[in-house]
Amino acid sequence: MKPWAFIAGFVVALAAALGYFLIKKSPEDVSVVHHLTLQQPCDLHLAPCVAADNVGRSVRFQFTPADIPLMKELTVQVDIDGIPAYQAGQVIVEGTNMFMGYQRAELRTDTASSLTGTLVLPVCTLEKMAWQATLDIETPTGKIQAIFPFVTQR
């Protein structure tokens, strides 16, 4: 066997092995998402909404001002219960009856159990716009997620 063929074969085998180990995901690499269920009733115009699960994790979500105006700064407030050691949070708002882009609010720690942020909702050509706010909270054991639907009027 020629020396160059041996070296070429070795390089190909080494590249294949390296690629396998880089692409293969271990269970620790997979991000776990824990979904919280929206508790009823929920109308963000009337009161904060709550989402919870059966192991004691819950979030209380609200916009200020509660009338949720368009093209004005909204404050997002999230009160957290049963979620120790959370690291970061964000809210992404998107239209459900018309694509209006993604409005993001990076949430910062307000108190030991509260996060706040701000965002602005765009004006839509529709008189009534349906939205959903997806809350993501990062923890050492994965992501906590809750979805809050709401409607705005032009």
Image (tube, helix red, strand yellow):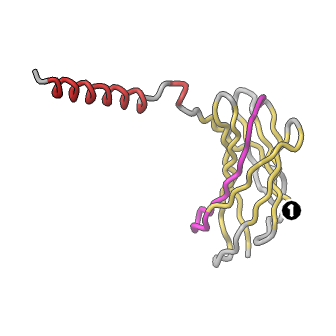
Crowd rating for badge 1 (residues with CA inside 10 Å; few <14, some 14–19, many 20+): few
Residue 104 spot, x, y in % from top left: 69, 57
Residue under the point 60% across and 36% down: 33
Find residue 87 and report its image quarter: top right
Residue at the outermost top position: 1
In screen coordinates, is 89 left or right of 31?
right
| Residue under label 1 | 65
Residue at the outermost bottom position: 125
Please give the range of residues in magenta: 83-101
Residue 61 spot, x, y in % from top left: 79, 48
Disc 1 residue type (three-letter)? Pro
In the rendered structure, does residue 78 fall within the stretch colored magenta?
A: no
Image quadrant containing the N terminus: top left
SS for tag 1?
loop
Residue under the point 81% across and 38% down: 80
Residue 131 spot, x, y in % from top left: 66, 61
State whether residue 56 is above or below residue 52.
Answer: above
Find residue 28 and report its image quarter: top right
Residue under the point 87% across and 35% down: 112
Residue at the outermost right position: 111
